[in-house]
Amino acid sequence: MNLFTTSALKTLSRGLLAVLVMGGTFAVAQEKKWKDQAEYDLYSKMAASKNPDEQLTLLKQWEEKYPQSDYKLERAQAFLVVYTQKNDGQGVYDASKRLLTIDPNSSQSNYMLTLLTISLNKTDAAGLETGTKAANALIGQLDTMFAMDKKPANVSEEQWKKQRSDTEVLAYKTLGWVEQQKKNYPGAEAQFRKALDLNPMNAEMSYFIGTVIALQKEKDIKRQAEAMWHFARAGNLEGAGALDPTRKSQIAKYFERVFKSFAGDDEAEMKNIIMQAKGAPYPPANFEIKSKEQKMIENEEKFKAENPDLYMFMQVKKGLVAENGETYWEDTLKNAELPKFRGKIVSLSPEKNPKEIVVAITSADQPEVTLVMETALRGTADVGTELSFVGVAKEFTKDPFSMKVDVENDKLEGWPVQAAPAKKTPARKPAAKKPTKKK
């Protein structure tokens, strides 16, 4: 296992371990005494070696032969250094715990235990307790650890401050992770937020916050929207705080899938949320993502207000084609006067002076309702002519859907007024000529 996954972490670890190893040489306190020459020779051989495996063998010999050495502390520190050089995570973890038994204030041990609680997935009760204690101790030691007189010469003041911030972020990240394993999701969220506040460009913290909000299974839609904001940010944030490309892509795809499942396929809305989330670690106070159900209800209310008669017919039709449509027909609609509906003529029977008119209501030309007139209408009308009517429901077919209604002539509106045939004027007889007087 590679303990140091980023250059920043490598630099940080070198800084923390500088007191233990300088140029490959192990330092020991001079005021202490060796038990004998053999102990000193063991130490010297170990310190001179450049091979971590050989160093580890010599350290174990030293520990076995001189368990009560004056240099127990330095030896425990050397174990930590060698396991770190070997990238042996479990070895570093065990060495850190051993060092704490000798030096309860070891910041190096607390740092490594804080780091490795997550890296080694220490989810058992003892591991979670160790991680919590180490992270809290680490936070308390930050001022001492990162005092300016402790700064290595090859690390700038700006880098040293950043390392302090990164260490504090790591501590809160571990505390949040521990609470998440305990299923204390609100507690985990609080710790992750502290970490994100310290480094707002940390995409991983955004992902963790989104995860624990989602795990709380909040019924509040605003909280679901908040979780999606964090997933959008984690999956699309760029720069120093971004996740590695593979993980970033996975989270971006996860956000897209969750968004579409929750809010529908509005690509423009989704892209707008991504752009907003990339610009801020937290959503604004009024941020919301409307669910598909919300949008449907709002659209339905708007449609209802703008098209009340069409909306009413669609509700009637919906009830009739439902599984219990026949019951709805028999109990509610049959022989009942329906509200006023509007439809467009599909056909007339007969075409002139029709007694029946087939109309489409929800579409332009799909036959749905047959109007059976009280008496035949006069004249004719073009297909597509819009009519309004109030009728009494008489017959119903479920598949394909059709309904017959009886309509009184005076309850039909929109039928074209047919011009009455012109009356013929009787031809006038020519005026009789007056008789001419004979001369």
Image (tube, rainbow, N blue to C red):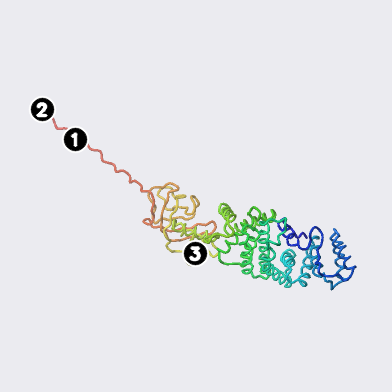
Seen as rendered, the residue at the extreme left is 439
Separation of residues labelled 2 and 1 (CA atoms): 21 Å
Separation of residues labelled 1 and 3 (CA atoms): 73 Å
Q: Is residue 186 left or right of residue 99?
A: left
Image depth: mark 2 or mark 1 in front: 1
Q: Amino acid at mark 2?
A: Lys
Q: Label 2: which residue? A: 438
Q: Is residue 382 left or right of residue 213?
A: left
Q: Position of residue 208 (x, y in %)?
A: 65, 62
Instruction: Give the SS element for disc 2.
Output: loop
Seen as rendered, the residue at the extreme front is 31
Instruction: Give the SS element for disc 1.
Output: loop
Q: Is residue 290 left or right of residue 138?
A: left
Of callouts 2 and 3, the N-terminal one:
3
Q: Position of residue 319 (x, y in %)?
A: 51, 62
Separation of residues labelled 2 and 3 (CA atoms): 93 Å
Instruction: Work out whether 53 lies above or below 72.
Output: above
Image depth: mark 1 or mark 3 in front: 3
Q: Label 3: which residue? A: 329
Q: Amino acid at mark 3?
A: Trp
Q: Label 1: which residue? A: 431
Of callouts 1 and 3, the N-terminal one:
3
Q: Amino acid at mark 1?
A: Ala
Residue nearest the viewer, comparing 246 with 367: 246
